[in-house]
Image (cartoon, helix red, strand yellow):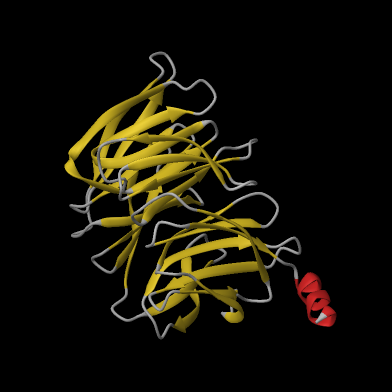
Amino acid sequence: MGKGVSRLTLLEGHNKAVTGIAISQGSDKLYTGSGDGVFRVWDWYTGHCVGELNVGSEIGCLVGDGPWVFIGLRNLVKVWNTQTSAEYSFDAPLVQVYALETNKDMLFAGILDGSILAWKYNPETNSFQFVTTLKGHSCGVLSLKVGRQSLYSGSMDNTIRAWAFSKDGCLEVDHTHKEEHAVMQAWAFSKDGCLEVDHTHKEEHGVLALFGMHEADNKSILFCSCNDNSIRLYELPHFRVRDQIYGKQGVGVIESGPGGIYFTSDGAGEVAVWKLLSQAQTAEADLAE
């Protein structure tokens, strides 16, 4: 375990890899989904599981948005309101949903055939209505992220696509980047709003998951999970190594919580709760030894 982080507790119960983590805003509840087909609710302060639901299918991903939790399954997306316990579902093609992302009243799902499905929330019917299918990737879409009026998608075809939101709310491909080598790149927005590679870092081990968060002093920290069972913490944009921790098996999901808390899940089905220490706290710990 690195000196710049502190493990607070360990959540045990899943018997296959945890594929999704979501938090409920304004509460101490954490939600996890796994390849074992079980959706679990945790009190992450105590580490106790306070509820579970067998959804009958491998869970590919989870995403939370306000009181809503979206669960990506095979040919299905389940939706659950954590405040009212209301739940419903809507169909996807007969393939696994691997990535979910929300943006205001929109929901996006990345699926195995390389498509991205989009739904829009209708307040009159209190449900999501299918809007369109975004096509461009040739293999499964594993990652989706919204930022700067664009939807970014990462695929097993080794490309990252930027889909721009037009004035009428439609999405169209704005930029495509293809990378054949095992490198990580830090991208920066230029003055005209375009994305450009700012720094490049070659990683010796295969990258399984990436997640970014800011410290109290606004430093950008990148969490990089690799296939040697490690998680490396880099300070951006120069990829300076901040710390390194290890898990039992490859960490596939990293998610942030309040106040420097973050969560990691590994292939053994465990979810660890961590606290990112400030540099001052790390220095104090070194002096105390």
Judge from the rendering whether residue 217 lies leftward or rightward of residue 198; answer left or right. right
Which residue is located at x 40 percent, y 80 percent? 183
> Quadrant location of the C terminus?
bottom right
Front residue of 136 and 37: 37
The outermost residue toward the left is 94
Residue 7 visible in the snapshot: yes
Which residue is located at x 57 percent, y 64 percent? 191
Judge from the rendering whether residue 156 lies leftward or rightward of residue 200; answer left or right. left
Q: Is residue 29 above or below residue 219?
A: above
* Residue 52 rendering spot, x and y as whole percentages: 42, 36
Judge from the rendering whether residue 169 lies leftward or rightward of residue 278; answer left or right. left
Residue 165 visible in the snapshot: no
Front residue of 59 and 15: 15
The total of numbered circles placed on residues is 0
Front residue of 180 and 94: 94
The answer to which quarter of the image holds residue 120 is top left
Q: Is residue 161 above or below residue 91?
A: below
Which residue is located at x 35 percent, y 53 percent? 15
The answer to which quarter of the image holds residue 123 is top left
Front residue of 150 and 18: 18
The outermost residue toward the top is 124
* Residue 249 rendering spot, x and y as whole percentages: 40, 69
Judge from the rendering whether residue 100 lies leftward or rightward of residue 135; answer left or right. right
> Quadrant location of the N terminus?
bottom right
Which residue is located at x 66 percent, y 69 percent? 5
* Residue 272 rendering spot, x and y as whole percentages: 54, 58
